[in-house]
Image (tube, coloured by chain):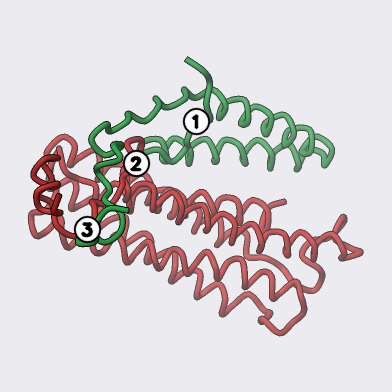
Chain colours: A green, B red
């Protein structure tokens, strides 16, 4: 299956994990920035790349099923049905 | 062939407009919440852009932030952050409880979340009263109140959603199979918490 983008807000559990991840993300950046500004920038860059890689690790959702009943031409009458066909 | 006869041939007894098409990938309410959160993220993004612009053009920003004589109440905001993050845990507990058919847990979790959200808002109002500057005291002050106020408004919206969910929970709504009315406010509440972490880290700490 092809890779897709992971939705961090897919459901409540995923959103909660996203929150925990955000706490860890900013904790590292803030601590690194307090040590040295350049270290904070490095942490920001490295973590952001990691987050992008993590979010791209999702599975592509399945293709939508085609509803054959709804796809037929006869399903959608066009024009005034009282008029004779042209 | 008349319309009725044609309809009988094709087996169409349906009158009125055709049924609205639905995505087979995603529930409409969930899609609506995603779109809403997407617009919210862009709204916050524009405020952050203004904040970073103000900060970058300030000549003293690299050494001292906020610009003197202003100071941020980092400790009070830190306590507020702990309160808000804890409220996400109680929100998560509430949803896990109803999934296990624990109605008391759902009710307690929602009430605790609402109480902590309210405490967050009240603390923020007190912080505004004691912060020592106002919206008219330059671009820095405007952006500060704009960002934190925007977030506070979102907490208020979240509290409204949670109150509706809590009232429904006390009226006996929701079950292990049907708890969409708790899940969606939960997603929104976690999102609001995430946005506060971004605000707290960038405005108060960095």
**Image height check: is A50 above or below A16?**
above
In the foreground, B148 or B179: B179
Q: Are marks 1 and 2 in contact (CB under 8 Å)?
A: no
Q: How far apart are marks 2 and 3 (CA)?
A: 29 Å
Instruction: Name the residue at 62% across, 41% down.
Output: A26
Q: Which residue lies furthest to the bottom in this view?
A: B136
Tell which subunit mark 3 falls on: A
**Image height check: is A64 above or below B147?**
above
In the foreground, B130 or B110: B110
Tell which subunit mark 1 falls on: A
Relative horizontal placement of residue B98, taking residue B78 as reference (left or right) = left
The residue at which mark 2 appears reads as B23
Task: List x then y, in percent, for residue A50.
Answer: 64, 27
At mark 1, the secondary structure is loop
Relative horizontal placement of residue B85, taking residue B49 as reference (left or right) = left
Q: Do the residues labelled 2 and 3 touch (CB within 8 Å)?
A: no
Q: Disc 1 or disc 3, which is closer to the eye? A: 3
Q: How many labels does the image show?
A: 3
Task: List x then y, in percent, for residue B2.
Answer: 13, 53
Instruction: Name the residue at 15% across, 34% down.
Output: B100
Q: Which residue lies furthest to the top in this view?
A: A1
User: Callout 2: 10 Å neighbours few (<14), some, many (20+)?
Assistant: few
The residue at which mark 1 appears reads as A6
At mark 3, the secondary structure is loop
Tell which subunit mark 2 falls on: B
């Amino acid at each position: 299956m092809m890779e897709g983008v992971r939705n961090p807000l897919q459901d409540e559990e995923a959103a909660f994990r996203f929150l925990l991840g955000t706490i860890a993300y900013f904790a590292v950046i803030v601590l690194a920035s307090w040590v040295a500004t350049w270290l904070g920038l490095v942490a920001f860059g490295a973590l952001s790349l990691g987050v992008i890689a993590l979010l791209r690790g999702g599975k592509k959702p399945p293709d939508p099923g085609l509803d054959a009943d709804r796809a037929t031409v006869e399903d959608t009458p066009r024009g005034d049905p009282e008029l004779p066909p042209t | 062939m008349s319309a009725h006869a044609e309809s009988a041939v094709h087996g169409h007894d349906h009158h009125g407009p055709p049924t609205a098409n639905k995505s087979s990938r995603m529930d409409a309410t969930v899609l609506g919440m995603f779109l809403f959160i997407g617009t919210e993220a862009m709204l916050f993004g524009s405020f952050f852009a203004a904040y970073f612009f103000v900060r970058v053009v300030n000549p003293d920003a690299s050494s001292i932030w906020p610009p003197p004589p202003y100071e941020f109440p980092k400790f009070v905001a830190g306590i507020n952050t702990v309160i808000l993050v804890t409220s996400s845990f109680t929100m998560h507990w509430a949803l896990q409880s109803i999934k296990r058919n624990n109605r008391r847990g759902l009710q307690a979790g929602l009430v605790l979340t609402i109480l902590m959200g309210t405490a967050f808002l009240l603390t923020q109002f007190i912080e505004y009263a004691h912060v020592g500057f106002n919206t008219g005291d330059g671009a820095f002050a405007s952006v500060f109140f704009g960002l934190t106020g925007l977030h506070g408004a979102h907490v208020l919206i979240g509290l409204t959603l949670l109150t509706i969910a809590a009232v429904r929970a006390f009226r006996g709504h929701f079950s292990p199979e049907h708890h969409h009315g708790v899940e969606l406010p939960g997603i929104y509440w976690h999102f609001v918490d995430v946005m506060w972490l971004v605000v707290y880290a960038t405005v108060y700490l960095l």
